[in-house]
């Protein structure tokens, strides 16, 4: 009997670790495999949204003809899906080389949105906070007032509340001065307000975020943009320097108005010296991937809570594109962190536009309806100015039925037995 108990004890000593290991392995497998539900039926395209996009395409073609815009490209993203991605026209007026979805444009001041996006990622990573002071990272930086210099923080830089006069030293940007040189001259300008009090749009002062980031991380703004934004979002043609756009064979030429006609212009190196304010190059395919993230669908890169901080008003600021006010009655407009926020009676649009060197860019999205639109054009004018307001005009007339279809489809999918 004693021998039997001894044999059983020995077997238990051998078996228990094995059983425990198997339990732990099963537990680990459960942790790995329990993810968001996977549905048996794929998500269907919304036929009502598809119908609207067909109508929008026809309207854009008419608008492009009326405006005589040489070339453009448009993307529409609905939640996490690119639902419309289309090029229009040619890369160069008088030529036959058509724009495609990978053709690169300069996105001008929409670069500011990317700079705030990257800064948000670094805030999320606890590299610094929105309210850290600029001089803690760039000790040589100075405004004319030592007191205001000490108050200036990252939030002020990205919301254009630096106290500087409108477009301070933008003329030096166009003359090709270095960023360090331009920043050093800011201490000679009389401030128009206290830091944080008033909105005053900047290119030079906005770009102080680049040396702040370099000081905090030891890496350049350009390299971190590649590492933390372009590469993880698979923005394959995006870049942030002059040589890259010049070496790319698939680039839209900029155009300027001459004798009532669009004439191709030379791609210049201006505004690459203020890269956070206006130095990014990208295709419409790149911009579509970025918009998916802007709508909160890439939390592996940036969280929804950080995005919400970018879209929170900091200071009242008039919208520069008046077409957004004609779309519906505009209640108020603000600037957040790298973004304009437009308030309508029943809607909010997050928006930014840009112009540089004959290129125009526009991006806007409705967070409530999770729909975003981007237009890139190789000439200024009616297409870029009106293309996004036109989309939201059409969308607003059919929004209720589009959203009702989405809700019905979601309920049907939830009834399709989620796989745990």
Image: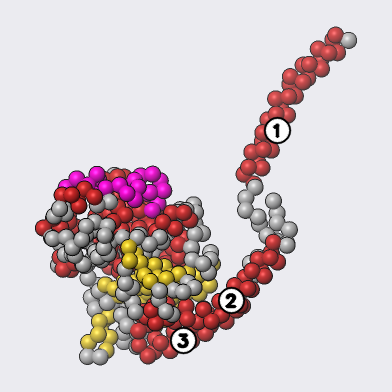
Considering the numbered disc 2 on the image, is that residue within a helix, a strand or a loop? helix
Numbered disc in front, either 3 or 1: 3
Residue that mark 1 sits on: 22
Q: Closer to the camera: disc 2 or disc 1?
A: 2
Q: Residue at x 42, y 65 (%)?
A: 286
Picture disc at residue 304 = none
In the rendered view, would you say 347 is above or below 94? above
Q: Residue at x 36, y 64 (%)?
A: 339
Residue sitting at the far right: 1
The residue beneath circle 3 is 59
Place of residue 46 in the rendered image (x, y in percent of width and height, measured from the top left): 61, 74
Q: For the residues labelled 3 and 2, say whether their Cβ atoms are less than 8 Å apart.
A: no
- Dot 1 surroundings within 10 Å: few (below 14), some, or many (20 or more)? few
Q: Is residue 397 left or right of residue 103?
A: right
In percent of the image, x 18 and y 63: which residue is there? Answer: 192
x%, y% of residue 119?
A: 35, 53
Magenta region = 120-140
Q: Is residue 214 magenta?
A: no
Residue lying at the far top in this picture: please name it. Answer: 2
Residue at x-position 64% and y-position 69%: 407
Does residue 90 appear in this view?
no
Residue under circle 2? 400
SS at circle 1: helix
């Amino acid at each position: 009997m004693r021998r039997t108990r001894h044999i059983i004890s020995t077997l238990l000593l051998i078996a228990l670790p094995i059983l425990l290991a198997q339990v732990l392995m099963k537990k680990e497998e459960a942790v790995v495999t329990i993810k968001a539900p996977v549905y048996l039926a794929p998500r269907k395209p919304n036929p009502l949204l598809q119908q609207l996009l067909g109508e929008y395409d026809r309207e854009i073609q008419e608008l492009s003809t009326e405006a005589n815009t040489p070339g453009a490209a448009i993307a529409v993203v609905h939640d996490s899906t690119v639902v419309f991605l289309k090029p229009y026209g040619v890369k160069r007026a008088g030529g036959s080389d058509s724009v495609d979805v990978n053709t690169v444009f300069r996105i001008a001041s929409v670069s500011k949105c990317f700079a705030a996006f990257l800064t948000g990622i670094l805030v999320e990573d606890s590299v610094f906070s929105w309210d850290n002071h600029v001089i803690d990272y760039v000790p040589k930086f100075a405004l004319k007032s030592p007191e205001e210099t000490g108050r200036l923080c990252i939030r002020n830089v990205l919301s254009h509340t630096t106290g500087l006069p409108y477009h301070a030293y933008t003329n030096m940007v166009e003359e090709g001065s270095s960023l360090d040189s331009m920043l050093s001259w800011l201490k000679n300008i009389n401030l128009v307000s206290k830091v944080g009090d008033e909105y005053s749009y900047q290119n030079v002062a906005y770009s102080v975020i680049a040396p702040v980031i370099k000081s905090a991380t030891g890496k350049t703004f350009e390299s971190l943009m590649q590492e933390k934004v372009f590469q993880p979002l698979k923005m394959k043609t995006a870049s942030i320097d002059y040589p890259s756009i010049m070496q790319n064979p698939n680039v839209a030429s900029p155009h300027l108005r001459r004798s009532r006609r669009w004439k191709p212009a030379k791609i210049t190196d201006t505004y690459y010296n203020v890269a956070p304010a206006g130095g990014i190059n990208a295709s419409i395919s790149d911009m579509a991937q970025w918009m998916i993230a802007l709508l909160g669908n890439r939390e592996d890169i940036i969280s929804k809570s950080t995005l919400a901080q970018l879209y929170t008003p900091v200071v009242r600021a008039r919208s520069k594109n008046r077409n957004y006010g004609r779309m519906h009655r505009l209640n108020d407009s603000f600037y957040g962190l790298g973004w304009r926020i437009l308030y309508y009676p029943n809607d909010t649009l997050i928006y930014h536009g840009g112009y540089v060197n004959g290129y125009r860019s526009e991006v806007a999205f409705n967070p409530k309806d999770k729909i975003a639109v981007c237009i890139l054009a190789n000439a200024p004018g009616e297409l870029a100015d009106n293309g996004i307001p036109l989309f939201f005009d059409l969308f607003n007339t059919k929004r209720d039925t589009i959203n009702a279809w989405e809700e019905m489809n979601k309920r049907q999918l939830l009834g399709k037995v989620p796989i745990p």
